[in-house]
Image (tube, rainbow, N blue to C red):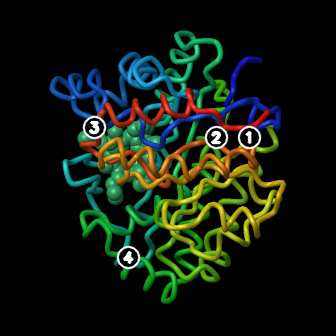
């Protein structure tokens, strides 16, 4: 895979432009996926390696991105612990909640066979992808997965009970985090055995706790997963969304790359953060809902940044939103590829 601009950049080999891919690039606005969803449920697509592989590769042919993130979901881990997930139109819900259980681990079982289809999807993606396109495997960080497991069918973005649980039942919390970390580690190994080139850890709900609480109760589990991945020489990208000044405390002993959320100034962060740490992000996904004149204005602000930071990966500060106009995503990819990044 010597010609991959994404892998080259991660490894420090300079190119004339940054590589580009988007979080949630596969299952959102692309026409083939939209069409498939009229015929199949999300779960059916995820559990069918042929369909999942073709959805994984659609952004590569349709948008021209430099990496292919495997089509599955972070909640496959909840399923592998015996919690059935419903992927409804308002986001996923689980069929029961761990929140009130006196011994929540008794409600869980160990079903690693549920993870197996991902390996078949990765196989097929690798057979069918262009040679220069690396595959990106991923998982949710234990805290973000636990958020959904504690919530069950509860309201989507209310973190009150989650935070209360950390303060009130720290031991039960830690045991659940261990259980999730163990199966997630198995899952990361399965993806690496199948041949993923890069691994991203999504901690979408990291900002639900004050950073120092997150650092004490959640970061150690992320580090354990990262260590497993790094032991295999696979580069890791870590996305702890919403941790505010916690971003500045990250360094290359924790992760190879940090994916920066849209709330944080990447220019200011670059000034204070470990120079050995690669950055990814952090265009506001909502910018892609605006018209192209305004997208262009904001895009231009990244050119001086990328002129200096030659390891930066162009990406959003969170996933592509539903209903983002396809032409705007294509416009942005084309601007990344056709602009003069003033690097020579
Ligand atoms: O590009 C891709 O779509 C790749 C595959 C992918 C990824 C990387 C999916 C498919 N999900 C994810 C990660 C994921 N899943 C995260 C972390 C990234 C993020 O914050 O966006 C999270 C929090 C989830 C949980 C989840 N699953 C959500 C978010 C709900 C919430 O609380 O805001 C949703 C909507 C799902 C279902 C889901 N997962 C993936 C898709 C395409 C869908 C929608 C299914 C459909 O078509 O109806």
The residue wearing badge 4 is 159
User: Distance of mark 4 from mark 3, alpha carbons?
Assistant: 31 Å
The residue drawn where x is 40% and y is 20% is: 62
Q: Is residue 79 visible?
A: no
Going from N to C along the chain, the mark reached first, 4 or 3, is 4
**Quadrant housing residue 282:** bottom right
The dot on residue 199 is 2
Callout in the foreground (2, 3): 3
Question: CB of residue at label 4: within 8 Å of ligand 1?
Answer: no
Q: Position of residue 76 (x, y in %)?
A: 43, 44
Q: Is residue 24 left or right of residue 17?
A: left
Q: Position of residue 301 (x, y in %)?
A: 56, 53
Q: Position of residue 221 (x, y in %)?
A: 66, 63
- 128 lies above or below 342: above
User: Distance of mark 1 from mark 4, alpha carbons?
Assistant: 31 Å
**Total marks placed:** 4
Going from N to C along the chain, the mark reached first, 3 or 1, is 1
- C-beta proximity under 8 Å, tags 2 and 3: no
The dot on residue 325 is 3
């Amino acid at each position: 895979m010597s010609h991959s601009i994404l892998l080259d950049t991660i490894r420090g080999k300079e190119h004339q432009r940054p590589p580009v891919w988007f979080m949630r690039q596969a299952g959102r606005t692309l026409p083939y996926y939209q069409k498939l969803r009229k015929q199949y449920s999300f779960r059916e697509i995820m559990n069918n390696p042929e369909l999942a592989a073709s959805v994984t590769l659609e952004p590569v042919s349709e948008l021209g991105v430099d990496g292919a993130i495997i089509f599955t979901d972070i909640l496959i881990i909840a399923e592998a612990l015996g919690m059935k997930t419903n992927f409804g139109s308002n986001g996923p819900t689980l069929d029961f909640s761990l929140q009130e259980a006196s011994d929540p681990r008794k409600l869980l079982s160990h079903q690693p066979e549920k993870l197996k289809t991902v390996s078949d999807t990765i196989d097929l993606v690798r057979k069918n992808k262009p040679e220069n396109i690396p595959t990106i495997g991923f998982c949710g960080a234990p805290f973000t997965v636990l958020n959904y497991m504690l919530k069950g069918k509860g309201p989507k973005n209310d973190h009150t009970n989650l935070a209360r649980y950390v303060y009130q039942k720290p031991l039960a919390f830690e045991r659940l985090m261990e259980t999730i970390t163990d199966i997630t580690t198995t899952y990361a190994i399965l993806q690496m055995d199948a041949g993923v080139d890069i691994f991203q850890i999504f901690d979408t709900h990291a900002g639900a706790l004050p950073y120092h609480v997150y650092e004490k109760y959640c970061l150690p589990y992320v580090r354990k997963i990262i260590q497993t991945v790094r032991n295999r020489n696979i580069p890791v990208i870590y996305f702890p969304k919403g941790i505010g000044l916690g971003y500045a405390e990250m360094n290359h002993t924790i992760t190879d790359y940090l994916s920066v959320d849209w709330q944080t100034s990447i220019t200011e962060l670059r000034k204070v953060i470990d120079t050995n740490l690669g950055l990814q992000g952090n265009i506001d996904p909502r910018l892609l809902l605006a018209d192209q004149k305004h997208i262009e204005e904001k895009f231009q602000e990244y050119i001086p940044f990328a002129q200096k930071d030659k390891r930066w990966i162009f990406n959003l500060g969170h996933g592509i939103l539903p209903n983002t106009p396809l032409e705007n995503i294509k416009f942005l990819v084309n601007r990344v590829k056709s602009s003069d990044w003033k690097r020579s």
